[in-house]
Amino acid sequence: MASLFRKRHTGEHTTPEKFYIEACDDGTNDVLAIDRVSTEMTLSGKKDIPPAAVTRPICGIMGTIRLVAGVYLVVITKKKKVGILFGHNVWKAIDFDIISYKKTMLHLTDDQMQDNKTFLSMINNVLTTDGFYFATDYDLTHTLQRLANTSPDFQDMSLLERVSGCGSAWSGKGREPGQKCYLDTLTPSISVIVMKSCCINGKTFDWTLISRRSCFRAGVRYYVRGIDSEGHAANFVETEQIIQYNGWKASFVQTRGSMPFFWSQRPNLKYKPKPQISKSTNHMDGFQRHFDSQNILYGKQVVLNLVNQKGSEKPLEEAFAKLAASLGNGMVKYVAFDFHKECSRMRWDRLQILVDSVSEMQDEYGYFLVDSDGKVLLQQDGTFRSNCMDCLDRTNVIQSLLARRSLQSQLQRLGVLHVGQRIEEQAEFEKIYKNAWADNANACAKQYAGTGALKTDFTRTGKRTQWGLVMDGWNSLIRYYKNNFSDGFRQDSIDLFLGNYAVEEEEGSTPLRVQKDWKFLTLPIIMLVAFSMCIICLLMAGDTWTETLAYVLFWGTASACTATVILFNGHDFVDAPKLVQKEKMD
């Protein structure tokens, strides 16, 4: 069945009884028949497709998912070619369709219909998140070095069987036994892929940037922080920079992820909620599991902690430093760099201090290199694991600088750059490079925080601008709104898509119908009325100024007191997740 899904173009034929998925490549006769009643899948031939079937072209199958109304088939209806990687086409999925196995919804009650509609909107919410990429005949979920070091048995596996935790992106969990959701037929990656053909000194090479999001502990900014009991970090992203030139291949890998201990930062209507470090959990267990897995995957680790070393972020930095010192692992080195303090007053040149301080370790770790005969010449022996609070804005800036330094060495080794030449001097390529890393930042930020990244003006231009500060302020305001009033729905969407919450068919009661506390509607209405009356009193003055002042003070005080009560009970007024219990997410 897996070989069928690797075909480049697919046709979908629908009858009242079955779906027929046809691989449309020349010479193939394979058809996947899906029974709409029993949900059974079988392989057959083109001759079995009824002439009366309704036919349309599709680009591939994402998989199936069970909702209240029954099972749905998720298909890719539109794709866009991103580029060619080692001779393999890489596609970006643009549009999707969710097709019900059921021919009617008459078996559902009104409440079930509404729940099913909400679940469908959640699936659509994830599918419309920018960043689903796939290749039908190449494994995008692994780095070049991992693929080169795998066993022959692994090489013989189908792409579907190879799905890994990082880069299977949202789909890996769906393959666990007993899960209802397995949207992984094409092993698509929610990530970022930038592919550019570049030229320096008249020598053309292909430059690729791939960021792979882990499917473990996936979620949105304030509802998923820290790690889980297995050591999986929130917002963990593996970023690989690839060079292809005259048959040679070079790769440099970095990672980012939330600070790997148990902490949270739940939204509560405040602009920046205070982080909370768990006092009842053994942090070292999860911390050690996290770095044990990182050492196995990537070798030595240099942790670059970019959070503030004062204010609300200070306890997090201190906890991270203490755990790293107590770990006693010679393969993990901890480096703290107060990004905001060092770069205050637009002194962005001071980032070079960090780059220079870790340059010897970067040279020691090296990069992965394969010659035109396929012989592995160099292995990357370690990675930089960067983090800030969100692992977005500050992190991306530092990663772009480290990646440029590695690229400098790679291009010189391949003979693209002459001795003494610097990448920064190649204006055309430098523009491509900076814009690609800024696009990488925006895509990662939109998936986790709901807006584009901050500080991308520095990534794009190499300097901080006043307009960049204005755009950062605007994005921060949008983040505030989404984090407080829409991220609960986004978190539920991700949990449903991943299979963290399994919907039972014709489920009588779902967590969606949990009633809000009386304060949720009453207090905002009181505050709005009081504030409106205050404005009216100012605009329609009374007979005397003392009378006007009395009314304004009364309604102003009522408005302020109500607002204070709302802020004090901020957790009750934000859009919180409903499908997965909160304590399971911490």
Image (spheres, rainbow, N blue to C red):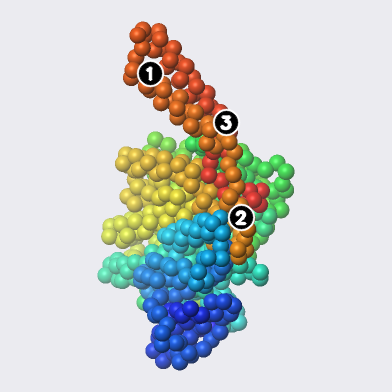
Secondary element at image label 3:
helix
- List the residue tagged with mark 2: 510
Residue 163 visible? The answer is yes
Q: Earlier in the sequence, mark 3 or mark 2?
A: 2
Please give the name of the residue rendered at 47% of the width and 55% of the height, measured from the top-left corner: 447
Give me the C-alpha separation between circle 3 and circle 2.
Answer: 29 Å
Secondary element at image label 2:
loop
Of residues 583 and 240, the one drawn nearer to the viewer in this rendering: 583
Relative to residue 560, is residue 67 depicted above or below? below
Please give the name of the residue rendered at 56% of the width and 84% of the height, measured from the top-left corner: 42
Q: Residues within 10 Å of mark 2 (few under 14, many from 20)?
A: some
Residues marked 1 and 3 touching at CB (< 8 Å) = no
- List the residue tagged with mark 3: 568
Residue type highlighted by circle 2: Thr
Q: Earlier in the sequence, mark 1 or mark 3?
A: 1
Residue type highlighted by circle 1: Cys
Left or right of 146? Residue 427 is left
Residue 239 visible? The answer is no
Q: Residues within 10 Å of mark 1 (few under 14, many from 20)?
A: some
